[in-house]
Amino acid sequence: MSTTPNAARTPAAAPSPLLEKAYSKATWHLIPFIFVCYFFNYLDRVNVGFAKLQMLDALNLSNTVYGLGAGIFFIGYVLSGVPSNLILHKLGARRWIAVMMIAWGALSAAMLFVTTPTSFYTLRFFTGVAEAGFFPGMVLYFTHWFPAEKRGQVMALFMSAIPVSGLIGGPLSGWMLDHFSAGQGGLAGWQWLFLLQGLPTVLLGVAVFFYLSEGIRQARWLDADEKAAMLDALAADEERRKQNPQAVQSTAVALANPNVWIMGVIYFCIQMGVYAINFWLPSIIKSLGFASDTTVGWLSAIPYLLAGVFMVYVGRSADRHGERRLHLAVPMLMGLAGLLIAANFSTNTVIVMAGLSLATMGALSALPMFWPLPSAFLGSAAAAAGLALINSLGQVAGFVSPFLVGWIKDATGSTNVALYILSSVLFVGAVLVLRVPARLVNR
């Protein structure tokens, strides 16, 4: 990554009471609803990790088949990421996000009809296609509401849906598997899990049409002065970005810019750790000797609870200090340390849980701490393509990570070797983060 010195940035003025009031209203109006949408987005994406506890035996599938099916979702996701975000940029967030949510909710619920590896792969692939534009679209959507100095906390609040999906989704999924294990209504527990967690997404997709505003100007819940203050703040933020000689201002330049591609590699490293945790945490905990799926669900909630608290704390700290690199690199190194602890003490339940908790806190907190970096140098015209490309590159890890862990588990009978590899990838990512010029990404 280039280390050419930047011109000194004009510091952002302290927000006025009017502007702070407007930000507060925007945060309370947007974030809770989008949080719920992302909660179900992530739950629908990774609930296959809990379904696996019954699904593999019921359908006679191997760990390798599971790992490939869990990962093939991201092939569709990566192929559709940039086109989907460009469509969102043209049609507007409200309409396209609603369409995506209805589609992926229906496809996720349809997972109950899986009977063969082929049907498993097919539904996972098309669910990935349907979901592809949601997350980068939300990142782009926030750039239309909040300037760079506000996005660390906003992204942390939004992405805390990930640990909350584990905190609530783990016990809920475990309970569903046990409660419906008798085959009520002719469906197995894993089939009920897909159905009951997919249908709420469809309903939320319908609600998006009526709740979300396309932007500040269309927000009826803001008065004229609040709209003007927020629009002025965004204009000033864009002007500061234009003063940065390394800023990227067009779609074509964004897709060819080496800084964008390096950001994609860093995000790939983060996601390698994240998806190993999301898809294999229930199996690792169950391998410690717990027979009840409900117990596994409650124990899996512990790392996510700690990660949710830590994620919000780190987001606030990053915005308060105007520092981005260390607030990303340190959580990545925590994830590395946690995976190594879990691998080296794999027979000690307490130490493994401590290691998994540290890994989850670090890896998941790295996610929201990453996104303010590229959005700091991508201009408004370049953001749609640039953010989607970075997200797509990172999501390749969603295929590689679960397949790698599944293959190693079948080959060795243990996940330890995979955890060593994943910790090494996180280390590489942390080194790349620290090589990013501070002036490129800090406030």
Image: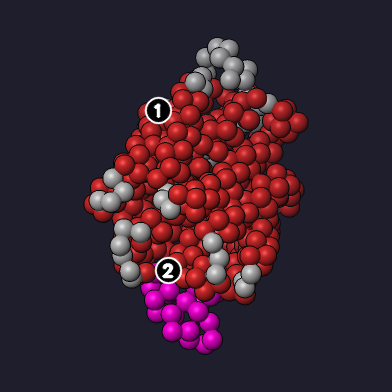
Front residue of 439/305: it is 305
- x, y (%) of residue 172? 40, 69
- Residue 348 is left or right of residue 188, and the answer is left
Residue 181 on the magenta segment: yes
Using the numbered discs, state the Cα–Cα distance from disc 1 to disc 2 in whole angstroms: 35 Å
What residue is disc 2 on? 173
Q: Quadrant of residue 338?
A: top left
Residue 273, label in figure: none
- In the rendered image, the quadrant that contains the N terminus is top right
- Residue 61 seen by the camera: yes
Front residue of 317/131: it is 131
Magenta span of residues: 174-197
Residue depicted at x 37% and y 69%? 293
The dominant secondary structure in magenta is: helix
- x, y (%) of residue 85? 68, 47
**Circle 2 sits in a helix, a strand or a loop, which is it?**
helix
- x, y (%) of residue 16? 43, 35
**Few, some or many residues within 10 Å of mark 1 (<14, 14–19, 20+):** some
**Circle 1 sits in a helix, a strand or a loop, which is it?**
helix
- x, y (%) of residue 236? 57, 29
Q: Is residue 172 above or below residue 151?
A: below
Amino acid type assigned to the residue bearing label 2 in the image = Ser
**Few, some or many residues within 10 Å of mark 2 (<14, 14–19, 20+):** many
Q: Contact (CB < 8 A) between labels 1 and 2?
A: no
Colour scheme in use: secondary structure
Residue depicted at x 49% and y 65%? 52
What residue is disc 1 on? 326
